[in-house]
Amino acid sequence: MPYNLKGRNVLVTGGSAGLGALLSTTFAEQGCNIAINYFNRLEPAQKVQQECEQFGVKTVVVKADMTSTDECARAVEETITGLGGIDIVLANAGWTRFSTFADLDSMSYDEWDKCWSANVKVPHALLKAAKPTFDSNPDGGVLITTGSVAAISQGGSSMPYAVTKAAQFQLVKCLGATQGPKIRVNTVLPGLLLTEWGLKYPKEVLEAIKDKAVLKHESYLDDVADAFVTLAKNTSMTGMRIQVDAGLNIQSS
């Protein structure tokens, strides 16, 4: 039976820009109350908050560093306090920077650790913090991560990003296999997103990625957001992925 989103309390990490901002407004349009997480730019978060409130839902803005497990646990608690509970966590925030795969010195081990924290430890810690409330909710709870096709290929913004997104995908499967029956854990794997971050790729790289995709375009943001809504509503999926990449990386498994 589909999970009714109206009235659900949703934390969106990295919710003030790019895909996170769209997820915030998309779930608000579905009737969800939204906690918009940001780290260092308050004004964009407040703008997203205003856009969400146009749908007549309750919203809060939560400042927290999503490379810190302590900070993300606090964000869950502030969501519960501000909205009156928590039903869904959209673990959208991540970390990387552009670097060359072939250059093994292009990312420091501190940066590898930061990728690991943001892309693996924090989604785990978000669910750990939300689990007591999820377990007490009549309809349980939902964790959906923003993955990447970098998890199942050998490309992306950096090698640490690709490796830790692969680990995040395995985390989703492990959590999905162990945290039921009241908790569902899934992931969305986008390809190229033309967000503020994605547009930092050189123009020739953007065109090459779009040309490589079977459908000859980027992953449309609205399509990616729709995949999150689908996973939030679907009560028969856990430990699964929806890949929204315009045919960039078609695999048999």
Image (tube, helix red, strand yellow):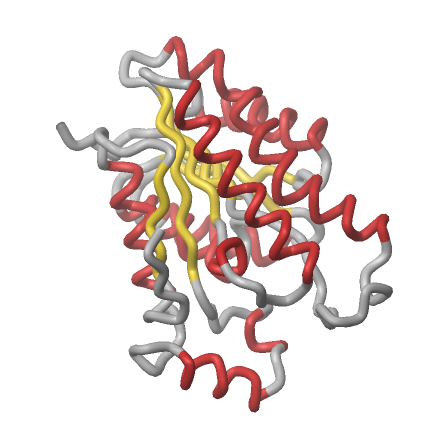
Estimate the x, y position of residue 105 in percent, counting from the top left: 86, 64
Number of numbered discs:
0
In the image: residue 172, left or right of residue 234: right
186 is higher (above) or lower (below) than 191: above
Figure check: 118 above or below 173: below
- Work out which quarter of the rendered image holds the N terminus and state it: top left
Q: Is residue 213 above or below residue 203?
A: above
| Residue at position x 28%, y 48% in the image | 29
Q: Residue furthest top?
A: 136
Foreground: 127 or 241?
241
Question: Where residue 119 appears, x then y in whole percent?
Answer: 62, 44
Residue nearest the viewer, comparing 17 with 182: 182
Residue 9: quarter of image: top left
Q: Residue at x 85, y 50 (%)?
A: 109
Q: Identify which residue is drawn at 48% across, 80% down.
A: 209
Side of 57 where 81 appears, left or right? right
Q: Quadrant of residue 108?
A: bottom right
Picture residue at 45% right of the left edge, 14% below the top: 133
Q: Percent position (x, y) of residue 192? A: 47, 70
Find residue 104 and report its horizontal and vertical position in percent: 82, 64
Q: Is residue 6 left or right of residue 47?
A: left
Looking at the image, which residue sits at the far left?
1
Name the residue at the front extreme.
Answer: 252
> Which of these two is toward me, 83 or 135?
135
